[in-house]
Image: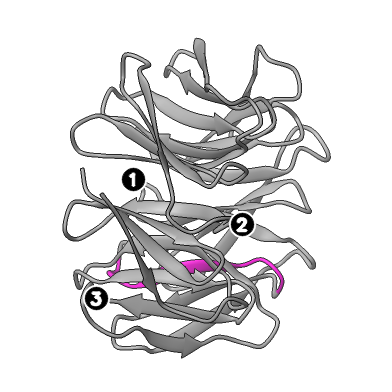
C-alpha cells in the first residue's frame, strides 16, 4: 500500500529525505530554500535556510545533527533537531555540493559536482577538498564502506572510491552512457547504484567487479537508492512515477505512485520501517514493506 502526505506546496520541491535521530523525517525543499521536519500523523515544521541556497541532499551527522548540501549556495549546512542552523562556506567558489554522507572516520564527506572534487568536513567545520583525476566527471551521490567512501561519477560513466587519506580509484561501468547517480551500501557489503541513463541497477563489489540488472522500462530514469534492513534495495524511478525494489538476487518489483507526474527523488527507511520517498511536487510517499 502506498500513501502520500502533503508537506508543502507544489513549488517548494521536496528532494532529499532522511530519518533523524529524533524519530522524525527530515527533508530538503530545494526550490523553497528550507529544511522540513515531519512526524507521521502530524504537521510539518519548516526551517528557513539562506535564500537561493538550494538545499539538496540531507544526512545524519556523527554529532546527531542534520547535515545537508546547498547546491546553489555552495555551502554545507548543519541543523540541530532543535532548529539551530549553521552554514559553512566552501574553500572553492561555485563548487556545487550535492551528495553528502557520514564516513567511518567521524567526518561528513560530500561531492562537488561543478569542480569535480570530493570534500570532507568535520563536525566543527574544518574542510578539506580532494580533486578527482579527471575533469567534468560530475561526482554525484556518495556512501560509506569500510575505510573509504564510494561515489558515482555521472558524466565519467564510472564509480569512484576515495580512501580517508584522499587516494582515489575509478571503476568504469560496462554500459556506455549509463550516467550513474544514486548509490548506497548494501547489506551484502557491496555498493548498489542506479544508472539513470541506461535504466539499470548496478552492483559493485569491494574488489571492483560489477554486475548490472536491466529494469523492465529502460526509460524509467532511476534516481536514488537506499538499503532496507532485510537486504532489499529500494529506488525511485523519476521518469516513470514509480518506486522500485530489487533483491540481492536481482529480482525487481515496481510500484506506481498514486499521483501522476509526482517526480520522486530521494528515499529512506522511515522511523516506522516503511520506505519514504520525497516527491518534488510537494508530498512524502510511504510504502509499507
Badge 2: residue crowd in 10 Å (few <14, some 14–19, many ≥20) = many
Classify mark 3: helix, strand or loop: loop
Where does residue 203 sit, x and y in percent of width and height? 46, 20
Residue at 50 percent across and 31 percent down: it is 193
Residue 65 among magenta residues: yes
Residue at numbered disc 1: 104
Quick one: label 3 or label 1, which is nearer the N terminus? 3
Q: Does 199 sit left or right of 142 as displayed?
A: right
Residue at 54 percent across and 32 percent down: it is 194
Q: Whole-Å distance between the Cαs marked 1 and 2? A: 20 Å
Q: Whole-Å distance between the Cαs marked 3 and 1? A: 28 Å
Q: Is residue 157 above or below residue 1?
A: above
* Badge number at residue 213: none
Q: Nearer the viewer, mark 2 or mark 3?
A: 3
Q: Nearer the viewer, residue 87 or 257?
A: 257
Residue at numbered disc 2: 98
**Magenta stretch in the rendered image:** 63-72
Q: Nearer the viewer, mark 1 or mark 2?
A: 2
Q: Does 56 sit left or right of 228 as displayed?
A: right
Classify mark 1: helix, strand or loop: loop
Where does residue 258 sit, x and y in percent of width and height? 42, 55
Where does residue 165 sit, x and y in percent of width and height? 52, 39
Q: Is residue 50 above or below residue 66?
A: below
Q: Nearer the viewer, residue 92 or 274?
A: 274
Quick one: label 2 or label 3, which is nearer the N terminus? 3
Residue at numbered disc 3: 39
Residue at 21 percent across and 77 percent down: it is 41
Q: Please say whether residue 60 is visible from this viewpoint.
A: no
Quick one: label 1 or label 2, which is nearer the N terminus? 2
Image quarter (top left, top right, bottom left or bottom right) of the C terminus? top left
Badge 1: residue crowd in 10 Å (few <14, some 14–19, many ≥20) = some
Q: Is residue 65 above or below residue 178?
A: below
Amino acid at each position: 500500500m502506498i500513501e502520500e502526505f502533503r508537506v508543502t506546496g507544489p513549488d517548494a520541491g521536496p528532494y532529499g529525505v532522511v530519518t533523524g535521530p529524533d524519530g522524525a523525517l527530515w527533508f530538503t525543499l530545494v526550490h523553497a530554500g528550507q529544511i522540513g521536519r515531519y512526524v507521521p500523523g502530524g504537521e510539518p515544521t519548516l526551517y528557513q535556510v539562506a535564500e537561493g541556497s538550494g538545499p539538496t541532499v540531507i544526512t545524519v551527522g556523527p554529532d546527531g545533527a542534520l547535515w545537508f548540501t546547498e547546491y546553489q549556495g555552495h555551502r554545507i549546512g548543519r541543523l540541530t533537531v532543535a532548529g539551530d542552523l549553521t552554514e559553512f562556506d566552501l574553500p572553492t567558489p561555485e563548487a556545487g555540493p550535492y551528495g553528502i554522507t557520514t564516513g567511518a572516520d567521524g567526518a561528513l564527506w560530500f561531492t562537488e559536482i561543478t569542480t569535480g572534487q570530493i570534500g570532507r568536513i568535520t563536525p566543527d567545520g574544518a574542510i578539506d577538498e580532494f580533486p578527482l583525476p579527471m575533469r567534468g566527471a560530475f561526482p554525484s551521490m556518495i556512501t560509506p564502506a569500510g575505510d573509504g567512501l564510494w561515489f558515482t561519477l555521472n558524466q565519467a560513466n564510472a564509480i569512484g572510491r576515495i580512501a580517508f587519506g584522499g587516494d582515489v580509484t575509478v571503476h568504469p561501468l560496462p554500459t556506455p552512457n549509463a550516467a550513474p547517480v544514486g548509490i548506497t551500501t548494501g547489506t551484502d557489503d557491496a555498493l548498489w547504484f542506479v544508472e539513470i541513463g541506461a535504466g539499470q541497477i548496478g552492483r559493485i563489489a569491494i574488489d571492483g567487479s560489477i554486475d548490472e540488472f536491466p529494469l523492465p522500462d529502460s526509460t524509467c530514469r532511476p534516481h536514488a537508492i537506499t538499503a532496507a534492513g532485510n537486504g532489499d534495495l529500494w529506488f525511485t524511478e523519476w521518469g516513470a512515477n514509480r518506486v522500485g525494489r530489487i533483491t540481492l538476487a536481482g529480482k525487481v518489483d515496481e510500484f506506481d505512485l498514486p499521483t501522476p507526474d509526482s517526480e520522486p527523488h530521494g528515499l529512506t527507511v522511515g522511523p516506522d520501517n516503511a520506505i519514504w520517498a520525497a516527491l518534488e511536487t510537494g508530498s512524502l510517499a510511504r510504502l509499507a514493506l
